[in-house]
């Protein structure tokens, strides 16, 4: 059973339980995730925020029970679902509210406020966390790499969470859409380049779209996610047309039963 509805949101006043998380609640969520016992390896609150965005921009609606296990463990192993305790219930409630608030903000206002920490908040001397290589591998810190600039260090964990979601649910990559591919390239500029081609692309982006401040980089993240959300909306919310196996019979047409009488006085007599 899904925990929350992913349909396009409406505009009535929000109940307290449907409002976005406060700073204190984001800190509480991060603490709850950090408290998940080993051997599970959960995302932290910042990577979770990017992960949720990566789920929301998919060209399909993804049930929460498909992606939640990867929040609690990078390999998708389940946590506390047989007999959920207070911690499991609370963390799911907080995640559900953040998911709903981000979806609502993207749908109604074409933007959102990502949870990205200032470099000093993330730890000036710490290496940024690298994205998981696959759904079966936990996040691992990069080794023997040159130190990242402060802007990249602040943005990378969030984008790594987004990329992790896209790697688990690759429908976004499978779209034959140049606009989607271009926007993803812009967003992934904050991830470590793998190979000469990605390094060249990153260098070209840095020249054509320089991001001199953290605020400019955050704005670039918001714009990229909002564009992806719009580009995939038609497929995500498409309604399948129900086609009749047989032609519709009018009330004044001959009844298909072969009686010779009109449908309205034969088998259609009971219909309005």
Image: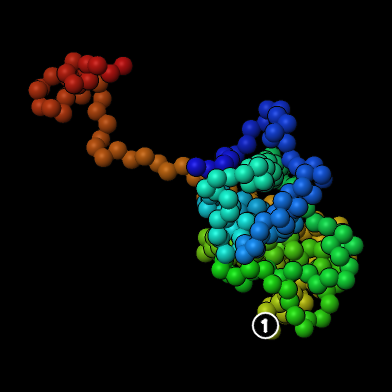
20 relative to 100 in the view: left or right: right
Rendering coords of residue 203 (x, y %) = 77, 77
Residue, far left = 259
Rendering coords of residue 235 (x, y %) = 52, 50
Is residue 24 shown above or below 10? below
- Residue 67 occupies quadrant: bottom right
Q: Tell me if mark 1 has few (under 14), some (14-19) or many (20+) residues whose alpha carbon lies within 10 angstroms of its own.
A: few
- Give the total number of marks visible in the rendering: 1
Residue assigned mark 1: 195
Rendering coords of residue 180 (x, y %) = 61, 61
Rendering coords of residue 52 (x, y %) = 65, 52
Colour scheme in use = rainbow
At 13% across and 19% down in the image, what residue appears?
261
* Secondary structure found at label 1: loop
- Quadrant of the image containing the C terminus: top left
Is residue 272 shown above or below 220? above
At 26% across and 25% down in the image, what residue appears?
250
- The answer, for residue 51, to whether it is visible in the render is no
249 relative to 239 in the view: left or right: left
- Residue 160 occupies quadrant: bottom right
129 relative to 232 in the view: left or right: right
* Nearer to us in this view, 90 or 139: 90
At 55% across and 45% down in the image, what residue appears?
83
* Nearer to us in this view, 182 or 130: 130
- The answer, for residue 226, to whether it is visible in the render is yes
- Residue 106 occupies quadrant: top right
At 24% across and 16% down in the image, what residue appears?
270
């Amino acid at each position: 059973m899904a925990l929350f509805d992913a349909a396009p949101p409406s505009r009535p006043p929000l109940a307290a339980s449907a409002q976005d998380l406060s700073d204190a609640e984001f800190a509480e969520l991060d603490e709850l995730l950090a408290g998940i016992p080993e051997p599970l390896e959960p995302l932290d609150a910042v990577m979770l925020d990017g992960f949720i965005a990566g789920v929301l921009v998919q060209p399909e609606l993804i049930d929460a029970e498909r992606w939640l296990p990867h929040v609690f463990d990078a390999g998708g192993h389940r946590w506390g679902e047989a007999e959920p305790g207070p911690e499991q219930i609370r963390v799911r409630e907080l995640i559900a509210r953040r998911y709903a608030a981000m979806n609502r903000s993207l749908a109604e206002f074409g933007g959102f406020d990502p949870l990205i920490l200032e470099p000093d908040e993330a730890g000036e001397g710490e290496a940024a966390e690298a994205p998981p290589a696959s759904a079966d591998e936990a996040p691992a810190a990069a080794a023997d790499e040159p130190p990242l600039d402060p802007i990249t260090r602040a943005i990378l964990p969030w984008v790594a969470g987004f990329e992790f979601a896209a790697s688990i649910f690759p429908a976004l990559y499978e779209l034959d859409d140049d606009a989607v591919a271009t926007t993803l390239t812009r967003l992934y500029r904050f991830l470590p380049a793998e190979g000469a081609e990605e390094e060249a692309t990153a260098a070209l982006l840095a020249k054509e779209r320089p991001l001199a401040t953290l605020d400019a980089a955050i704005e670039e993240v918001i714009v990229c996610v909002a564009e992806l959300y719009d580009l995939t909306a038609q497929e995500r919310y498409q309604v399948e047309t129900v086609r009749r196996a047989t032609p519709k019979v009018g009330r004044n047409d001959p009844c298909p039963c072969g009686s010779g009488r009109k449908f309205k006085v034969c088998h259609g007599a009971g219909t309005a």
